[in-house]
Amino acid sequence: MKYIYRIITMILVSLLASCSETTVDIVQFGTITGRVVEAKTFEPIENAKVTINPTNNTVFSDADGYFIMTEVETGDYSVSAKKESFLTNFQPATVTVDKEVNVIFEMDDDTSLNKPPTTPELITPIDGSENQELSVELIWSSKDPDEDTITYRLELQNDFDNDIVKIEDIIDTTYVISDLKYGVKYFWQVAANDSINTEVLSAVSSFKTKADPQNRYFYVQKAGNNNNIIFSAGYNEAETSVENIVQLTTEDVNSWRPRKNQASNLIAFLRTSNNETHLFTMNQNGSNVFQVTSAVPIAGFDLNEIDYSWSSNGDRLLYSHFDKLYAINKDGSGLEQIYQTFDGSYITEIDWSNDESVIALKTNNIVGYGVSIYTIDINGNILTTVLSGVTGAAGGLNLSVDNKLLLYTYDISGYENASNRQLDTHIFTFDFSTGLSTDISSSKVAGTNDLDPRFSPNEAKIIFVNTSNDGISSKSIYSMSINNGNISNDTTELFQNAFMPDWE
């Protein structure tokens, strides 16, 4: 029995030994979690494809950029995130038993390696150049290393106001800038943009336009939006061609009735401001606009007919407010009422003599008729009555430099109607020494009106407007010679579609 027991024991030991030599591998698992976001903004990226290698198991990120992979065998992996328009991102991950490993992908867009355009080089005009025309071609250069399409943004400023001109989406490297002003320094800068990178700014360059031509003609034209625009112009000696036309005011404001004063080298004009009409001044090139009146605006019958006057030395202006006449310093100070009509009639037109001893006035009633033209002294005393007790319209006052003559207009038809239409308006000179008026519109075309006469600087000619009496036709500005108050019949057309002339 002992022998048999020993044999059985030996067999069992052998079996146990063979079992201990055969082992079974146990598979263990972990979890990979994470999030996919944009590298710059950290905004979540939805539907990014997340893959682990070497198994190639794949999941997609949710709306908040999160993803999870469960039942991932323990071990080392390379995890990738892919999404169209982004560069593929790789992250390492080691998965351990029953643990979560978190992986964050900060993905760059696929243009992150794109290079911006080169800094624009401003070529023409040369920085600091002067005597440029009022229309200048701006030229610059820039290149894109990746040959992306470049668009440009141009900015232009000046040294006399706060206006900034901005031109967007230029596709060429040249741009012509027009309607510049005389004697002004301009500053320009260009930005290059490839629609991928931040725009690249050039240095600032400058140029200066040529000096003011000192134009002596001033007039008004109507803009498309029905505002009035003031222009200046030159004319050659033979009066055969216009030179140096300059737009002094813009279409977005209503500006009219220019009057140049040589002593102050300023141009006065009327402008609508806050639903009132006020006196303004500006430089010869249209810069440095200044509002003179404030407390008492210009007011009366038909603002298009109202006129005012400079003092000869340019320190003051005379203007009207219904039946009152005011003097004001050009800087807006010293407002003073110096006259009021005795019958309440409105003062519509004013001219002040060169020696400031005589003021010519045209008054009318509330509907524009019942006109009187007369002169007063600075104290308001009536000196001479030129026209009164007539029917029909009148106006256009201008005193000669020696106070001997007064230009004025009068509708000799005597016609009156609700719209103040004039049928046959002539220009007259009144001689203060004789008290006689002379008609100098003898050559006027029938059915037209001569309006707004002004003496030329040497008083050998007058400048005036002629237009059809229908009240709606275009107006043109003419000049003609006069001799001792008489017309010489040499009428010359100066400016078409223009009115309210001044010649200084």
Image (cartoon, helix red, strand yellow):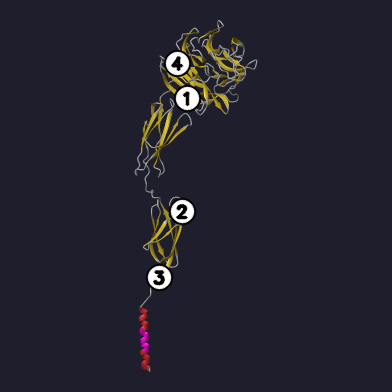
Q: Amino acid at mark 4?
A: Glu
Q: Quadrant of residue 374?
A: top right
**Label 3: which secondary element:** loop
Q: Indicate the position of residue 170 as horizontal and vertical percent values.
A: 40, 36
Image: 192 above or below 332: below
The residue beneath circle 3 is 27
Task: Give whichever of discs 2 and 4 has the lower sequence position.
Answer: 2
> How far is disc 1 from disc 2 in space, using C-alphas?
57 Å
Q: Indicate the position of residue 354 as horizontal and vertical percent values.
A: 53, 13
Q: Amino acid at mark 3?
A: Val
Categorize mark 3 by other alpha carbons within 10 Å: few (<14), some (14-19), many (20+): few
The residue beneath circle 2 is 44
Residue depicted at 45% across the width and 17% down the height? 494
Q: Amino acid at mark 2?
A: Pro
**Label 1: which secondary element:** loop
Q: Amino acid at mark 1?
A: Leu
From where the camera sits, is residue 263 visible? no
What residue occupies the far top of the structure in this picture? 434
Task: Check whether the beta carbons of the residues at disc 1 and disc 4 lie within 8 A of each other.
Answer: no
Q: Quadrant of residue 5?
A: bottom left
**Label 4: which secondary element:** strand
Task: Check whether the beta carbons of the residues at disc 2 and disc 4 lie within 8 A of each other.
Answer: no
> How far is disc 1 from disc 4 in space, using C-alphas?
22 Å
Task: Give whichever of discs 3 and 4 has the lower sequence position.
Answer: 3
Q: Which residues are magenta?
A: 8-14
Task: Give whichever of discs 1 and 3 has the lower sequence position.
Answer: 3
The residue beneath circle 1 is 248
> How far is disc 2 from disc 4 in space, using C-alphas?
74 Å
The residue beneath circle 4 is 493
Q: Is residue 12 magenta?
A: yes
> How far is disc 1 from disc 3 in space, using C-alphas?
90 Å
Label 3 or label 4, whichever lies nearer to me, is 4
